[in-house]
Image (tube, helix red, strand yellow):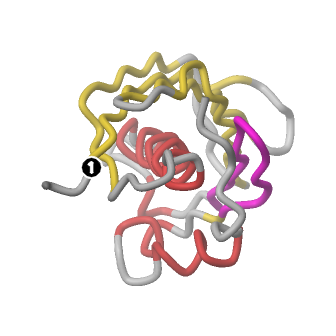
Amino acid sequence: MSALRPEVTIEILNQRGGEYLPGYLGIQMLELGQDFLRSRMPVKKLHFAPNNFLHAASIVALADTTCGYATVAHLPQGAQSFTTIELKSNHLGTVMEGAIACHATAQHLGRNTQVWDAVVTDEASGKKIALFRCTQMILWPRA
């Protein structure tokens, strides 16, 4: 099992997204602990599809970013990085305003792979709007 890396903090994770997609979308990390990470994303017009519903890709971006940052915080000692090798999402609802929240939890923290589940909810009501799972491949330095 990979332990939480003490040098990875919420502040570092929030800075990481800066000028990349997570920063542009307004994704914010909130709480990091052993085997979990919580985040949120304020809902703005840019998160919607032309049909005026929350775009599935916006929801996936929140869940995938949260799981990816959680992977960074739980990388095995000596690992270089990671890459997502599989993801799946089930969409159960939408929100029209406010914010959405994500709670990612580790299901497997191995030397070569990690599996993370995330539940995305309406931040105000707690109603589930998506279920997400991804598999991350751990990248090691080349010898």
| Residue farthest toward the left in the current orientation of the protein | 143
Residue designated by label 1: 140
Circle 1: element type: loop
Please give the name of the residue rendered at 67% of the width and 46% of the height, measured from the top-left corner: 100
Q: Which residues are magenta?
A: 29-42
The crowding category of the residue bearing disc 1, from other C-alpha atoms within 10 Å (few below 14, some 14 to 19, many at least 20), is some
| Residue farthest toward the front in the current orientation of the protein | 143
Q: Residue 119 appears at what percent x and percent y?
A: 64, 27
Indicate left or right for 66 with 80 as reference: right
Q: Quadrant of the C terminus?
A: bottom left
Please give the name of the residue rendered at 62% of the width and 28% of the height, measured from the top-left corner: 106
Quarter holding residue 93: top right
Question: Would you say the magenta stretch is mainly helix, strand or loop?
Answer: strand
Q: Residue 91 appears at what percent x and percent y?
A: 49, 20
Q: Is residue 97 shown above or below 59?
A: below
Indicate left or right for 143 with 113 as reference: left
